Amino acid sequence: MKLISQENSPSNLILFVYGTLLSGAHRNGTLKNSEFIDHAHTSEEYLMQDSGFPMVFEPESIALPSTHHCGQIKGEMYHIDSQTQTRLDQIEGVPNLYFRKDIVCIDSKGYKNYPYMYITQPVHFNHTKLFTVNEQGFHDWTQKEQT
C-alpha cells in the first residue's frame, strides 16, 4: 500500500499542472512564488483537447461513442499560496472556462497525492480537436508536436 505524500487543504494548496503552467512553458512564470513538489500523473483518465493550449475534460461529462481518447495525464505538482490561486483562477477563467477539482495523482515515487487541477467546462468540448494518448496511455502536453 502506498502512503499519502501530499494532501490539499486550505493552508496547504497543492496544484497539479499539465500544460502552459509546466516548467519551461510560457505561463510557468505565474508559479514563480510557488514550490515545485514533483512530477506526477493522474490516477484517473481524462480527455484532452488541443485548442492551442490543453483543455481537460472528465470523460463522463462528454457523450462519446468510445473512450479510446481517454488517458492519464502527465504533469507537475506545486505548493501554491492563496494569491497565486486567485491569479490562476483569473487566468484560467474560473468558473466559465475551467473549474477546480480535487483529484488523485501519483508522484514519481509512487505515492498518492491529492492536489486540485483545472478541468474544462463540458460546453467547450470539440471532438475534432482531441489530443491522443501516447504509447504508455498518457496525455503528455510536452510531447505535443510543434507546428
Image (cartoon, rainbow, N blue to C red):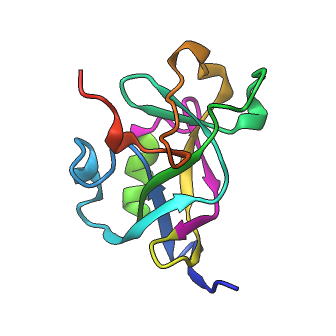
Left or right? Give the position of 19 relative to 109.
left
Q: Is residue 79 visible?
A: no
In the image, what residue occupies the spot 38% across and 49% down?
A: 87
Left or right? Give the position of 54 relative to 5.
left
Left or right? Give the position of 89 relative to 71.
left
- Residue 42: give x, y in percent of width and height: 58, 57
Q: Which quadrant of the view contains residue 113?
A: bottom right
- Residue 126: give x, y in percent of width and height: 58, 16
Q: Please provide the residue range marked out in magenta.
A: 91-106
Residue 119 versus residue 13: which sits nearer the camera?
Answer: 119
Residue located farthest toward the front when viewing the structure as drawn: 135
In the image, what residue occupies the spot 46% across and 53% down?
A: 74
In the image, what residue occupies the spot 48% across and 40% down?
A: 134
61 lies above or below 28: above
Residue 104 among those drawn in magenta:
yes
For the C terminus, the quadrant is top left
Residue located farthest toward the top when viewing the structure as drawn: 128
Residue 26 versus residue 109: which sits nearer the camera?
Answer: 109
In the image, what residue occupies the spot 70% across and 86% down?
A: 1
Count of labels shown? 0
- Residue 23: give x, y in percent of width and height: 26, 55
Residue 33 versus residue 44: which sits nearer the camera?
Answer: 44
Q: Is residue 119 visible?
A: yes
Left or right? Give the position of 87 relative to 111.
left
Residue 75 among those drawn in magenta:
no
- Residue 39: give x, y in percent of width and height: 40, 65
